[in-house]
Amino acid sequence: MDAYRAIVSRREVRDYLARPLEPEVERSILDAGRMAGSSKNRQPWTFVVIRDDAVVEAVAECVYEPANIRGAAFVVGILMSTKSRIDGGRAIQNMLLAAHALGVGSCPNGVNDKVGCNRALRLDDDADLLAVLSFGYPVKKRDPQRRSAKEWVERANRKPYDDVVREL
């Protein structure tokens, strides 16, 4: 799949099959995040893979949509070592797009209880957990190739181009 079609066809997935991801798929997703560019090549992230069921449940209670985490096959917290959140966003987007290209659904999850989530992950209370990503094979099969990139753009529920793009 070409990069542009991958970008415009990717959608959040919140319902996952009860099927684990293969270790090489997990590794590819994590490597995609690791390979993201960062300011001055600082790579200010740590990816916390959450496998323990009790920790997954505790983390689920700390995000805005707990069901996204509970049903996932693979859960990853994005921990930042600097306040440069744009670098973390780049790593997250790489991971979401890599998953999409591998046929894996994903959803970024915002944390509404950072202190509780940090405690569940055995982090300092002031640690900067940027997001929790959920991954899994989607219940509803996705086929990005069924439409052209242009068709994906036309069908997207997004603000009109002229409302978002401004030229001076």
Image (cartoon, rainbow, N blue to C red):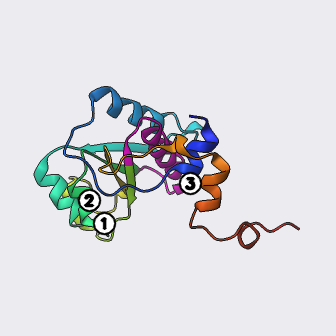
For this orientation, the residue located farthest to the left is 54
CB under 8 Å between discs 2 and 3? no
19 or 132: nearer the viewer: 19
Vertical arrangement, residue 155 with respect to residue 45, above or below: below
Query: Which residue in the protein does label 3 denote?
Result: 86
Name the disc covering residue 114, or none: 1
- Find disc 2 in the rendering and name its residue: 118
- Specify the amino acid type for callout 3: Ile
Front-lying residue, 122 or 135: 135
Residue type at mark 2: give it. Answer: Asn
Is residue 12 inside the magenta stretch?
Answer: no
Q: Quadrant of the N terminus?
A: top right
Q: Which amino acid type is marked by label 1?
A: Lys
Which element is circle 1 on?
helix
Mark yes or no: residue 130 visible: no
- Which residue corresponds to the image point at 27% horizontal and 36% vertical from the top-left? 21
Mark 1 or mark 3: which comes first in sequence?
A: 3
Q: Main secondary structure of the magenta part?
A: helix
- The front one of 132 and 101 is 101
81 inside magenta stretch: yes
Q: Are marks 2 and 1 in contact (CB under 8 Å)?
A: yes
Q: Is residue 36 left or right of residue 13?
A: right
